[in-house]
Image (cartoon, grey):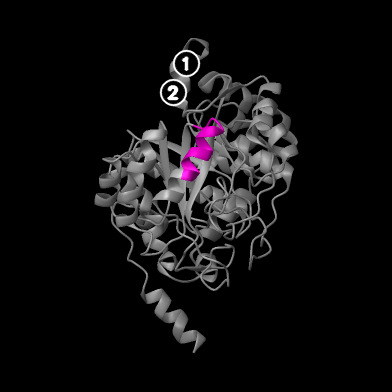
Amino acid sequence: MKKTQKTLRVLEQSPAVEGCFSHVLESLDWQAMTQAWQSKMAQDVESALSKTTLTVEDFMALISPAAEPYLLDMVAKSEALTQQRFGNVISLFAPLYLSNTCANECTYCGFSMSNAIKRLTLDETQIKQEVAAIKAKGFDQILLVTGETKKVSMPYFERMLPLIKPHFSQLTMEVQPLESREYKALQSIGLDGVLVYQETYRRKTYLEHHLRGSKSNFNYRVDAPDRIGQAAIHKIGLGVLLGLDDWRTDSIMMAHHLKHLQKHYWRSRFSVAFPRIRPCAGGIQPKCEISDRQFIQLITAWRLFDRDLEMSLSTRESPEFRHHAVRMGFTTMSAESKTQPGGYSDTAEKALEQFSISDERPVESVATMIRSQGKEVVWKDWDSALNKYGDSLTP
């Protein structure tokens, strides 16, 4: 029976699409990529550090074990490049969870459909209360998050975005993958950016962790950023869930994905995030641990790989880590995040959070921490920061 179910799940996968990343990914062998970073040596790292324009091969060298002795050099260069491109500003945003209802079965997520939890989808009144609570904290940049279900889809988004957008200068979404025409429709009512995290680029591992629901369709998800780009959305965000599989190989695949998107949708901006597996209801243990030192290596490698890339750090990480990471290449950070619907206003009946956050400090404390590192805090996205601090930035 299990074999039959697995076969059916494979048959349900969308085919690779010519011109989209799923087609490119067919030519990228996981084992070959793993062997490639394992073979990197000190001279490969030194070569990468000497360049101003890096290839994926250079990125492999910088995240390989051979680069570990060069970590201080990488941190210094990452800080200098971030300062040159983005100046001394860190923008703050808040995630607004609209619903924890989900039709997917994902092993690492508290919203997974088999978890016996209270489900909540915010109505218009509750959303207005959440927006008021978030605005009271000073935020002007917001990320809308939902579980993946037909109940919370285009009709819901088309009703709710007009309620939310007038209160924020930047509105980004992290919801189920949509069609290009749907992204375009949401753009017309205020959508600025879309984040679609692939979780892992290794198909076998992906299917092991996405057991039921539309999210088990690997190709449809991996091609979502192409559809976002085709809709000319202003910002496209990528990410892998560090720990589902080998973090180095997954990151290399994401680097290939970024290059593909930049080639075809060069008018869009791009961002990456670095979620590590956190505790949640029904959660799992990481398959591949990434230490704090390795995490810093990965962060700085991304900055050296692409000096124009926006990089985001969430409250999944501890206050201590976020304190030291502020200057390493990040451009945006979340603060005082609530990962359950109704979490800011406390007016809705308590619903389960998606995952446990680690940095629970009030936003004022996070802002003070950022300033202590010599950074300015801005509440809008980086384009707005450029308008305010442009004279201090070096092109």
Residues rendered magenta in the picture: 129-139
Q: How many marks?
A: 2
The numbered mark at residue 194 is none
Residue 123 visible here: yes
- Residue 124 part of the magenta-drawn span: no
Residue 357, relative to residue 74: is it above or below?
below
Q: Can residue 195 be seen in the rendering of this structure?
A: no
11, 172: nearer the viewer? 172
Q: Nearer the viewer, residue 313 or 123?
A: 123
Q: Vertical placement of 10 versus 238: above or below?
A: below
Task: Specify whether residue 136 is painted magenta.
Answer: yes
> Badge 2 local density, few (<14 within 10 Å), some, or many (20+)?
some
- The percent position of residue 9, horizontal first and vertical second, equals 42, 76
Identity, as a three-letter code, of the amino acid under mark 1: Lys
Q: What residue is drawn where x is 53% and y is 39%? A: 133
Q: Is residue 153 above or below residue 55?
A: below
Tag shown at residue 388: 1
Write down the quadrant of residue 184 in the picture. Answer: top left
Which secondary structure lies at badge 1? helix
Amino acid at circle 2: Ser
Secondary structure beneath dot 2 equals helix
C-alpha separation, residue under disc 1 versus residue under disc 2: 7 Å
State left or right for residue 196 relative to residue 20.
Answer: right
Q: Main secondary structure of the magenta part?
A: helix
Q: Position of residue 359 (x, y in %)?
A: 69, 43
Indicate the position of residue 145 as horizontal and vertical percent values.
47, 51
Q: Which residue, given by chain and number where applicable, does mark 2 sit on?
A: 384
C-beta proximity under 8 Å, tags 1 and 2: yes
Left or right: residue 36 versus residue 12 is: right
Instruction: Give me the residue at 54% from left, 43% from top.
Output: 273
